[in-house]
Image: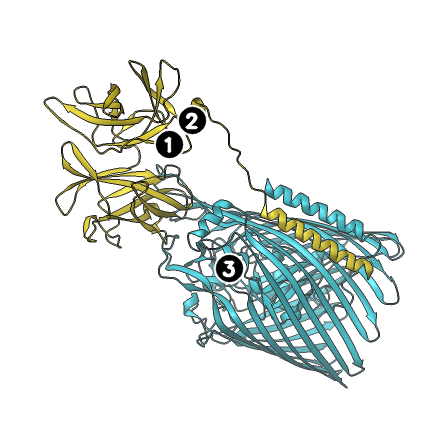
Amino acid sequence: MESTILHFKNTFIIILSFTLFLVSCEKKEEDKTLTPNDEVAGLQKVDTLIKGDYTFYIYKKDTGNFVVGYNEVYIQLKNNVTGLYVEDANLSWTPLMHMGTISHACPYSSISKVSNTKTLYKGYFVFIMASDDTDYWEITYNYVEGNDTLAQVVNQPKVVLSTGLTRYKSFKGSDNAYYYLALIDPTDPQVGTNDITACIYKRIDLYTFNPVQNYTIEVDPRMPDMGNHTSPNNVSLTYNTVSEIYKGKLNLTMTGYWKVNLIVRDSNNTILKGDSITSTTTASSIYFEIEF
Amino acid sequence: MAMKQIFLFFEFCFVFCALTYSQDSADSTKNLQLKEVVVTEKTGLDSINESKPLSSIDEHLQKLSNVGMIKRGGYAWEPTINNMATERISVTIDGMKIFCACTDRMDPVTSYVEILNLNNIYVGSGLAGNLHGTNSIGGGLDLKLQKTGFHARKLNLTLNSAYETNGNYRVLGTGLAYSSPSIYVNSGVFYRKSDDYRAGNNEKVGFSQFEKLNFFTNTGYQLSNHRVLEGTIIYDVASNVGYPALTMDVKSAKGLITSLSYRKDSISNVFSSWETKAYYNTIKHVMDDTHRPEVAMHMDMPGKSRTGGYYTTINGKIGEHNFMVSHDTYYNQSLAEMTMYPKDLADKSMFMYTWPDIRTLNSGISLDDKYVLNFKNILQFTSKLSFQRDGVESSSGYNTLLMYYPDMSQFQNRVLWNVNEKYTHYLKDVQLKAGVGYGTRAPSPTEAYGYYLFNSFDNYDYIGNPKLKNESSLEGNIAFIMTKPKYSISLEASYFYFSNYIIGKPNKSLSSMTIGASGVKVYENLSHATLLNTSLDTKVLFLRYFHWENRAAFSLGEDNQHKALPLIAPFTYSSSIGFIRKKFSGEIEWQGATKQCKYSPDYGEDETPAYSILNASVGYDIFFKHNMVNIKTGVENLFDRRYSTYSDWNNIPRKGRNIFINLTIPIL
């Protein structure tokens, strides 16, 4: 009997250690001092713009051209005299489309520091048309301190139409205003719950595109290949005042091609654009596409 | 990675346990009362008493009382006990836990063992059904493997072959039994192959073919007096198995089953034997829809199940208490995935885990005490307490389920227990039995964590529910058994009152995944459900060589709204007259069922009509030199009736007329 008791004791230990094993180990990340080079690791340099004492390094996340739709841009600013990167620069920019005699702008964000970095800044453009031989986008970058412009540089990035999945839509709302809607995340979707973020701008005039607040973007992800199968418990995107973009939850039940059908409502809950999915209406007039 | 580590860890556990207990070990089976003995004898077959000895385990099982078979085709039927299927019963092989690898139950555990490798099948009813069982509130099946044992040196070798006209069914096998005072070996190879079978009226049932190859070896080594080492290896490969009732077939189902046990007998005055067994089994199951003519969407659905565990069982006797104490632990991994290929080839394939790497660790202790009050009265107490930790190892799978259950935890703990008391009173030729018990079971992997598992029976996709409570059962049973020299009567009844009964219910807010499905069902706890099983068996011996056996059974299952539960047998009956005289044996059997009045349309059932069929068989033993060649032949479904029963998935018809011949030839 003694060994029986011993046995149970052992078993208990086995189960206990096993349970601990299942709980598993968690990785601890240690803080390291990042060099300016570390901070742009993984980013692609698209331009180097030198003006006077300063050099603007322009980065983006992926290779290839800028596309019509959402484009995230990263900037590092170097003081050529000291050789140091500027850590508290007040940066701004303006995009402008030149089309012969006329021109117009597009929705864009302000430039802010990337959190947890010392030298990296970021912002985005939502380009609303492609450039070509005669029509081109021109971005003006400004480094300002007080009332002084310390440096101003310009580049003319090539912008092409996205050939892949639809991540950008412009539409005329039921209020007759023009809206520009771009998907930001997910860029790397997973099966399960994904954070979905987007921005939506309203055109005031050719040079003014204002981000709208207090709207709602309803999502209804569907798989056309699976008889328009959908997922439960999706959360509509609402405006987040901190990040200044729209955030919601997107549930994807499996990998594959998803059409994320959208309905945009204004602050009075009036539908500006989009359709509910029914057995006869299989897709909304505005949607994003996701495939993974 | 993690999996490998876990299994390495378990292997370590086995070694650890083996080291700890190399001093004492024992046999667990001694006190088990065999309610049903199907096959005996050294080479595994009691050919005298079986009209069709080489038929599959499934065909043997369906003759047992309390046991039913759910059929999805010609192969690998799913056993039920007391009208309860896989999730409520336990099926073990020599006490080993093993779990099927198919999310659609195409590979019940019984399909991995061959008849020649069986000594007997122990069928236990209800909570006390299987000492080694876990979560078995309905009953348990233990497939006892063939072990010749230690005797004087002797070698038996038999050649077994069978042919059946229906489906051009061929069986070829050989079995070896070697015994000596220190070593025994049982080994064999069995091969079965069938084309599509034909239902009554010569109607071909497409996609009912199958092929199966089974190797087995059981061996024992006597270390010293009363100390025995035993090992088992089974390798089973089923390939090209058609499932006419389902939308998919099986490309291959491979099972590797291994165990090593150490047993010590005659330990002391109190302890008679102690057995410790470590086991590991792995099953890989690959479905196939490429042969089907019209597939809405081609998909791959591989599944695997790996189980490692051990048990240690000690038998003893203190005064009038015959007791058995057992401790067991097992760890199971069930993983199944589905990749779907859209018709539009430009679109990416779609992938999901249908069993998201489900892990189950269960460890428990059980007690069986048989207290002989006096010659006329016996009390038997059985109880089991176990701890279970289950969950989803795959983080992708966990994230998937989080969409449906945002606050679910990845792993959860459960405590499961049961108590059961049985009283037997002996009165001359009569036995009166009454039992009462209470027990709980954890949700099965499918019920807790299954993901979009399509059920072709009710045409719903099923999603598991990790928040399910344990299901509990309050059970009462009575039996009256009278055994006279010329006749016997047995009347049995059992009643189960379930609380938190687990069953799938439609959830209209969810969108089905399978194209054409009616919707999605999610497993829920019903407040209660009830199940009544009754049966009457009689046997009369007459005219010296004849015996007349009758059996009638009736069951009734209802949910909390008094609606019928699915897959509950209607009134069934059988009557047979058999004849045995020396080398001759013969049997005529009439069996059937009444119309299934209580059926469950919610679960895809319709009213199965009544049927009755006639079977006949004869057997003859030829003495050839000193050996006895056994020939059995017969015809099943003599009048070629087209019929299907309540448990035929999607009403696929059963075999029509079938003429069979079984041959057993001793070579050595």
Q: Position of residue B165 (x, y in %)?
A: 57, 58
In what element is the residue under mark 3?
A: helix
| Position of A194 relative to B417 (above/below) | above
Query: Which chain does cyan denote in the image?
Result: B
Regarding residue B667, the answer to whether it shows in the image is: no
Q: Which residue is drawn at 47% across and 51% down?
A: B248
Cα separation between marks 2 and 3? 48 Å
Depth check: give the residue in front, B55 or A283.
A283
Chain of the residue displaying label 3: B
Chain of the residue displaying label 1: A
Depth check: give the residue in front, B328 or B665.
B328
Please check whether the numbered discs 1 and 3 fall on a single chain.
Answer: no
Q: Mark 3 points at which residue?
A: B447
Q: Which amino acid does label 1 sit on?
A: Val
Q: What residue type is labelled 3?
A: Glu
| Position of A148 relative to B224 (above/below) | above
Q: Position of residue B179 (x, y in %)?
A: 84, 53
- Look at the numbered discs 2 and 1 and tell me whether their residues touch, using CB distance below 8 Å: yes
Front position among marks 2 and 3: 2
Query: Which chain does yellow denote in the image?
Result: A
Badge number at residue B88:
none
Residue density around tag 1, few if under 14, some if 14–19, many if 20 or more, within 10 Å: some
Front position among marks 1 and 3: 1
Q: Name the residue under label 2.
A: A39
Q: Mark 1 points at which residue?
A: A114
Residue density around tag 3, few if under 14, some if 14–19, many if 20 or more, within 10 Å: many
Left or right of B270 in this view: A139? left
Left or right of B401 in this view: B231? right
